[in-house]
């Protein structure tokens, strides 16, 4: 497997080496001189002018003192010639003899930058021609075995520095990726608490943002799995009671107690309703937000639900009425939307006392993002404790009361309604009325194009 660290490192290292070689070739082709070379030429010109002035003013004594000072302070061994005559006690360095002859023959200053830096400065003064010959002694700061003047040493230093910088850069890029890889491996092993962001504390770039998004995904997966475990636990708990009653009823029927058959039928209907609700939940989870939907006439849908609920409430004198606007459309799956509203209406009808009224109102609602439709269902029941207004939308949640056994149900209806509302970009909330009763408001986005 190819390492991305090696690939990034070699890419940057090759690019930096290519840049250095290109600069060297361009400098060579354009005859560009390094800054140190230009500095030496100007310095030797200044030294030569000063040496000539001191010689003409104070003779050989001042010239010799000045040359000694140059050697002590700048490590430059120099001498001054008038034509071919040496004016100081310092001999001409043997390495500079050939350079001196070149300057005398060509009548201009010449310099050499080889293992030792040499320079012969030609200056004319009051009809005389002077030659200032200088040899720069290198400082041995790298020890006797390491010579910074050597070409191979320079190349090695350049490669070492560039390799260090490229290695740090490659590590900075690949470190977040390795952190993501380790976190993904831990998640695959079952450790859902693993996160990538702590290892990238202090970073504020795109890779850090990727790690944060990865952690958000891991948190979402952990939440979904925890909810799944909780749902399975609640389902097993809810199924245990009716199954136990069915076993008891079956034994009683076998003994000849035919009255227990009615209880068996009630428990079977309860199981059937619970399984139907669970299948609806599974259908919601399997639905894609971007799947094919259609424009549903919300007025006609509510009208049918109200008609069915009114029929069920006739025996206890309960009535269900529809108010508000009628000709409105919502883009959704008709079956899921029907379940969403029907669960709310049936819950209101169940908690409304005899001869009570349930109202289902359709109204336009304002929103910053898009126009909304609000379907508000109010009943005349006792309401819900304030602390439980959010919990009533949790799966299998039921309020403890003296008649809870008579009310029945597994506590999945309102949970299904919230899941459907969220699926289509809406929301559902519950509020207690001032006098008595509960108000459940369902808000859904209005369809952009209604079907004809």
Image (cartoon, grey):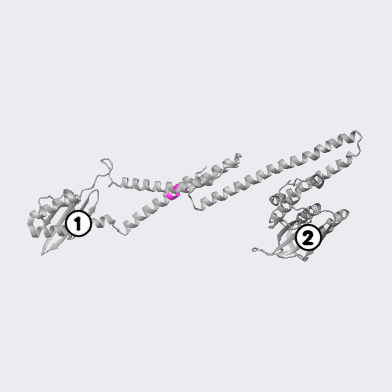
Mark 2 surroundings within 10 Å by alpha-carbon count, few (fewer than 14), some (14 through 19), many (20 or more): many
Residue at the top extreme of this rendering: 255
Question: Closer to the N terminus: mark 2 or mark 1?
Answer: 1
Q: Residue 357 at what x, y percent from top left?
A: 82, 58
Q: Are marks 2 and 1 in contact (CB under 8 Å)?
A: no
Which residue in the structure is indicated by mark 1?
A: 44
Mark 1: secondary structure: helix
Mark 2, residue position? 360
The span shown in magenta is 8-12
Depth check, mark 2 against mark 1: the one in front is 2
Q: Secondary structure at mark 2?
A: strand
Marks 2 and 1 sit apart, C-alpha to C-alpha, by 102 Å
Q: Is residue 385 left or right of residue 111?
A: right
Is residue 365 rendered to the left or right of residue 145?
right
Q: Quadrant of the C terminus?
A: bottom right
> Badge 1: few (under 14), some or many (20 or more) residues near its Cα, within 10 Å?
many
Q: Where does the image place residue 436, in percent across and percent down from the top left?
A: 76, 56
Q: Position of residue 303 (x, y in %)?
A: 81, 61
**Can see residue 340?**
yes
């Amino acid at each position: 497997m190819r390492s991305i660290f090696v690939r990034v490192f070699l890419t940057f290292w090759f690019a930096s080496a290519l840049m250095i070689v290109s600069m060297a070739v361009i400098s060579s082709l354009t005859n560009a001189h390094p800054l140190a070379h230009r500095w030496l030429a100007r310095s030797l010109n200044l030294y030569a002018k000063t040496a000539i002035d001191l010689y003409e003013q104070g003779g050989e004594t001042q010239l010799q003192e000045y040359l000694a000072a140059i050697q002590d302070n700048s490590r430059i061994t120099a001498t001054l010639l008038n034509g071919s005559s040496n004016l100081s006690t310092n001999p001409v360095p043997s390495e500079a003899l050939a350079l001196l002859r070149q300057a005398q023959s060509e009548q201009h200053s010449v310099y050499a930058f080889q293992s030792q830096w040499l320079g012969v400065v030609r200056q004319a003064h009051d009809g005389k021609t002077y030659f200032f010959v200088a040899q720069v002694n290198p400082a041995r700061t790298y020890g006797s075995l390491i010579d910074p003047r050597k070409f191979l040493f320079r190349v090695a230093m350049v490669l070492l520095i560039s390799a260090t910088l490229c290695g740090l850069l490659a590590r900075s890029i690949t470190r977040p990726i390795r952190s993501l890889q380790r976190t993904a491996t831990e998640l695959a092993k079952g450790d859902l608490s693993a996160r990538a962001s702590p290892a990238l504390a202090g970073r504020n770039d795109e890779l850090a943002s990727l790690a944060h998004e990865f952690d958000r995904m891991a948190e979402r997966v952990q939440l979904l799995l925890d909810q799944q475990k909780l749902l399975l636990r609640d389902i097993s708990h809810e199924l245990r009671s009716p199954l136990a009653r069915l076993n008891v009823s079956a034994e009683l029927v076998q003994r000849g107690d035919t009255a227990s058959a009615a209880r068996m039928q009630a428990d079977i209907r309860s199981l059937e309703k619970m399984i139907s609700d669970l299948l609806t939940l599974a259908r919601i989870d399997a639905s894609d937000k971007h799947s094919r939907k259609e424009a549903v006439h919300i007025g006609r849908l509510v009208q049918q639900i109200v008609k069915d609920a009114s029929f069920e409430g006739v025996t206890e004198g309960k009535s269900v009425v529809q108010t508000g606007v009628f000709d409105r459309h919502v883009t959704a799956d008709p079956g899921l939307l029907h379940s969403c509203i029907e669960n709310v209406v049936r819950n209101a009808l169940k908690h409304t006392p005899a001869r009570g009224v349930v109202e289902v109102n359709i109204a336009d609602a304002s929103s910053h993002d898009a126009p909304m439709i609000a379907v508000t269902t109010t009943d005349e029941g006792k309401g819900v404790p304030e602390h439980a207004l959010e919990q009533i939308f949790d799966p299998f949640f039921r309020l403890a009361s003296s008649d809870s056994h008579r009310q029945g149900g597994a506590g999945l209806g309102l949970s299904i309604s919230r899941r459907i509302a969220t699926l289509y970009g809406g929301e559902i909330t519950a509020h207690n009325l001032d006098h008595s009763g509960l108000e459940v408001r369902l808000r859904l986005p209005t369809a952009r194009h209604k079907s004809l």
